[in-house]
Every structure is written in structure tokens, then in C-alpha cells.
Image: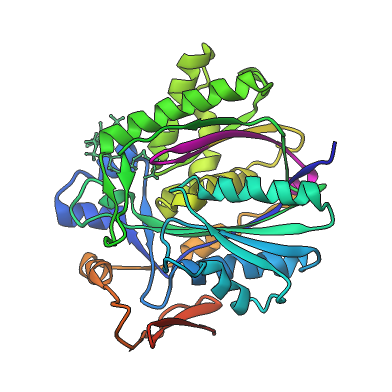
């Protein structure tokens, strides 16, 4: 059977960050609630000239610089921070990267699950045309109302993932477990720039979906829990992975402990929630921080509120041994905001019918230059 999976993966994030200690000082919350209770240290905040396109294009540029463009005929952009009801954000990326016209581009949405849906579609395309590779971009900005319980779980980030045959990084195994249910745990109406969330329901819906997807994986010939070496979960905040691991342990009757979760949380503790990119930031974090994973099996749980979820497994391939944690220096290079500066950026709304030029802030390869005639304009720096 053809081996298909993740050939390479690259992450990108924003120019700014907000330290949760700084937020705690202003709001009078015990900082331990954020660091221990939620398992978060910081979150990324986009500058006025950054968005899902600039982050996604930056991640994809580095990915394609390493791997070339050969065989890339599809770009799938997964996001729940959509910029337009009609045009796929990936079309802007297609231009910014100078991709040839012979590339199909589309956007995929189902909350944080969209990245996994794009990967599964990519696997299908590659199965049919093994000479092709698919560029998947998962890019999101998590925004909740100020002073809401969700505020400390905001964040932003992108993952660019190259899917192809004989993958260098992670072979995705054919069996997967699915679980979908119509539930009002988290959503964002078309006229709202922040998400609506029922926090307690979202946690129980996530955990129920996780055990449901696990059971479906088992029913479809997936591996035993004892044959999985590392579990990586969608991490809206990293404590959620601990809750999921504890529930899966109870469900399978095997004590899974917590220690194995530490490497997969290193980037996410600092990025915050990156929605579609969150699981893949966790996967990259594991691969970048553990040196002896080649030949080992990853279990990957993807949850998208609303809800659709999937349990995947994959076997780590030799290129993982030479990964570096260079993304740590990207996280370190972000510029911290004061709480008033963060709030000013948070309050910024761009009506689509007013021409605007954004200030030059980002030092990323691409910037969002503004709106003209209701159309978004981007430029390479
Ligand atoms: N020291 C240490 N821990 C503390 C503490 C302190 N001083 N004060 C509180 N805590 C702990 C609490 O005990 C709690 O721990 P447990 O979860 O283990 O019980 C934790 O901190 C959170 O505190 P609260 O229970 O008081 O919860 P909250 O009102 O702050 O809300 C939340 C937490 C519901 C996650 C909220 O942040 C939220 O709504 N976030 C957005 C929704 C979300 O992320 N849901 C996750 C599942 S849905 C999903 O995964 C999709 C997605 O991406 C959104």
C-alpha cells in the first residue's frame, strides 16, 4: 500500500504577544490560574498588518523553500477566521508565493477540525495521483470578548503542511476514528468578530467526541492504546490535553500519565489557541523537542466545535531526527504588548467599505497593506 503522510511542517505566528502574567496583573486574577489552571503562559496577537493570510503565507514560504514546488497542484486553506464569504484566503497566498496558475485553491471550514479535513482531502488527492503533493495551510486567529472567560485562551498561528507519498516526517495510517454531533458549544456568527462559547459544554463536548472518535478508530482496526507512543490533542489551552488524556486513560483502562504531554505543549503554551493550526503546532512541538521518536506511533486527536472530530494515527519517519526547534526563536522574537496596547488592537474593526492603509509593523515576509475598493491588498516586504 502507498505510504502517504506529512512530508514537512512549518509554523508561523504574529509580531506581538501578550504575557498572561501582565493580563493577570491588570485583571486581578491569580496568575496561577492561567499558568497552572489553563496551562498557558502567553498568547500571540496580530499586528494591524497581519492576518491569517500573512501568517499562512509565511509558514508556506519557509516550507516550499525547503521542499520546492514539484508536484504541488493543490493548496487547501483551512480556517475558521475567514476573511470573505466567497474568496478563499488561499488565493491571496497563491499570489504572494508566486504559485503557478495550475494549482487548485479552496478553503475548508469546520471550526478547529478544518486542518484535519484538509489533510484527509489531501491524502485522497495524493492516493489518486501519487506524483502530486498538496500544500495544506491551517491558519487562525482566536478572538473572544474582552473580560470573558475565553480571553486568556486567545492566540494566533499558522501551520503549513506538505502532504505526499513516502513522507519524510509522519506516515498517516489509513484507519481513523470519526465523531460528529450538532452541539452549540462554540460558534461565531457571520456578523461577529468574536466567538460565542459555552465553556463547560465545550469541554464536555470535546471529551465525549474524543472517546467517541477513539471507539470508532478501534472499530475500524486502529491500534491498541498500548501501541501508541505519544498522544497529541487539539489544545485550545494545554490543560485541555491533560483532561483528554485522563479521560482516554479512564476509557481504555490504561493509566496514560501526563509526562508524555509535555513536549507537545511547549509551542502551544506560548502561541495560545491557533484553532485549525493548534493540533499541528502540537505535532510540530513533539517532533521538534523529542529526538528518539523515529519508528514510534503518534495518536492525534482533532476537535472542531459544533462539532466534528477525528482520531488519527501516524508513524514517525527518519527526517524527524534532524528537526530543530527554530520556532522557539520565532516565539522569542515577538514583541510584548501592554494591556492597553493589546486592547486597542483587539478593538480594531475594519469595515469593508472604507479604504484604509495599515501601519507598517510586521517583520514577517508578507503584510496586509489594507483595503481598497473593498478588496484586500497584500504585499511582500
Ligand atoms: N491556581 C491554579 N488553578 C486555578 C486557579 C488558581 N488560582 N484558579 C482556577 N484554577 C483552575 C480551575 O480549577 C480550573 O481547573 P480545571 O479545569 O482542572 O477544573 C481552571 O483553572 C479553569 O478555571 P475555571 O473552571 O474557573 O474556568 P473559566 O471560567 O476560567 O473558563 C474555559 C475556562 C471554559 C476553558 C474558558 O477559558 C473558555 O471558555 N475558553 C474557550 C473555550 C474553550 O477553549 N473550550 C475548550 C473545549 S472546545 C475546543 O477545544 C474548541 C476550541 O478550540 C475553542
- 175 on left or right of 2: left
Whether residue 6 can be seen here: no
Up-down relation of residue 81 to residue 230 (above or below): below
Between 303 and 146, the one lying in front of the other is 303
Between 149 and 126, the one lying in front of the other is 126
Q: Dividing the picture into quarters, in which one does residue 71 lie? A: bottom right
How many dots with numbers?
0
In the picture as drawn, the residue positioned furthest to the front comes out as: 86
Q: Dividing the picture into quarters, in which one does residue 98 lie? A: bottom right
For the stretch drawn in magenta, the main secondary structure is strand
Q: Is residue 308 magenta?
A: yes
Whether residue 273 can be seen here: yes
* Residue at 36% in and 50% down: 41
Q: Is residue 223 magenta?
A: no
Q: Residue 213: x, y in percent?
A: 52, 27
Up-down relation of residue 66 to residue 295 (above or below): below
Q: Residue 156: x, y in percent?
A: 42, 59
Up-down relation of residue 260 to residue 255 (above or below): below
Magenta region: 302-321
In the picture as drawn, the residue positioned furthest to the top comes out as: 253
User: Ligand 1, what quadrant?
Assistant: top left
- 56 on left or right of 353: right
Rendering colour mode = rainbow
Q: Quadrant of the N terminus?
A: top right
* Residue at 70% in and 37% down: 293
Q: Quadrant of the C terminus?
A: bottom right
- 89 on left or right of 227: left
Q: Residue 139: x, y in percent?
A: 50, 59
Q: Residue 255: x, y in percent?
A: 51, 16
Amino acid at each position: 500500500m502507498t505510504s502517504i503522510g506529512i512530508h514537512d511542517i512549518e509554523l508561523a505566528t504574529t509580531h506581538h504577544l501578550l504575557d498572561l502574567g501582565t493580563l493577570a496583573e491588570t485583571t486581578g486574577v491569580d496568575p496561577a490560574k492561567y499558568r497552572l489552571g489553563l496551562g498557558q503562559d502567553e498568547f500571540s496577537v496580530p499586528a494591524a498588518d497581519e492576518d491569517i493570510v500573512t501568517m499562512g503565507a509565511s509558514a508556506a514560504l519557509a516550507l516550499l523553500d525547503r521542499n520546492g514546488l514539484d508536484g504541488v497542484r493543490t493548496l487547501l486553506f483551512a480556517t475558521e477566521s475567514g476573511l470573505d464569504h466567497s474568496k478563499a484566503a488561499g488565493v491571496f497566498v497563491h499570489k504572494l508565493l508566486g504559485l503557478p496558475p495550475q494549482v487548485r485553491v479552496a478553503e475548508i471550514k469546520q471550526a478547529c477540525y478544518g486542518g484535519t479535513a484538509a489533510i484527509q482531502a489531501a491524502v485522497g488527492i495524493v492516493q489518486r495521483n501519487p506524483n502530486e503533493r498538496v500544500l495544506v495551510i491551517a491558519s487562525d486567529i482566536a478572538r473572544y470578548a474582552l473580560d470573558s472567560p475565553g480571553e486568556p485562551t486567545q492566540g494566533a498561528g499558522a501551520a503549513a503542511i506538505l502532504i505526499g507519498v513516502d513522507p519524510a516526517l509522519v506516515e498517516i495510517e489509513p484507519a481513523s476514528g470519526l465523531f460528529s454531533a450538532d452541539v452549540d458549544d462554540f460558534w461565531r456568527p457571520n456578523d461577529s468578530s468574536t466567538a460565542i462559547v459555552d465553556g463547560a459544554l465545550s469541554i464536555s463536548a470535546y471529551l465525549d467526541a474524543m472517546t467517541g472518535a477513539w471507539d470508532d478508530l478501534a472499530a475500524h482496526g486502529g491500534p491498541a492504546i498500548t501501541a501508541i507512543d505519544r498522544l497529541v490533542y487539539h489544545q485550545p489551552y494545554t490543560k485541555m490535553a491533560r483532561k483528554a488524556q485522563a479521560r482516554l486513560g479512564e476509557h481504555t483502562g490504561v493509566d496514560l500519565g501526563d509526562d508524555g504531554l509535555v513536549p507537545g505543549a511547549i509551542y502551544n503554551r506560548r502561541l495560545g489557541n491557533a484553532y485549525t493550526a493548534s493540533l499541528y503546532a502540537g505535532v510540530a512541538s513533539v517532533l521538534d523537542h523529542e529526538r528518539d521518536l523515529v519508528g514510534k506511533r503518534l495518536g492525534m486527536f482533532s476537535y472542531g466545535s459544533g462539532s466534528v472530530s477525528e482520531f488519527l494515527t501516524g508513524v514517525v519517519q527518519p527526517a524527524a531526527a534532524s528537526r530543530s526547534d527554530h520556532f522557539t526563536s520565532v516565539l522569542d522574537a515577538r514583541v510584548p504588548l501592554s494591556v492597553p496596547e493589546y486592547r486597542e488592537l483587539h478593538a480594531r474593526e475594519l469595515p469593508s467599505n472604507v479604504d484604509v492603509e495599515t501601519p507598517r509593523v510586521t517583520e514577517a515576509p508578507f503584510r496586509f497593506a489594507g483595503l481598497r475598493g473593498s478588496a484586500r491588498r497584500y504585499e511582500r516586504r
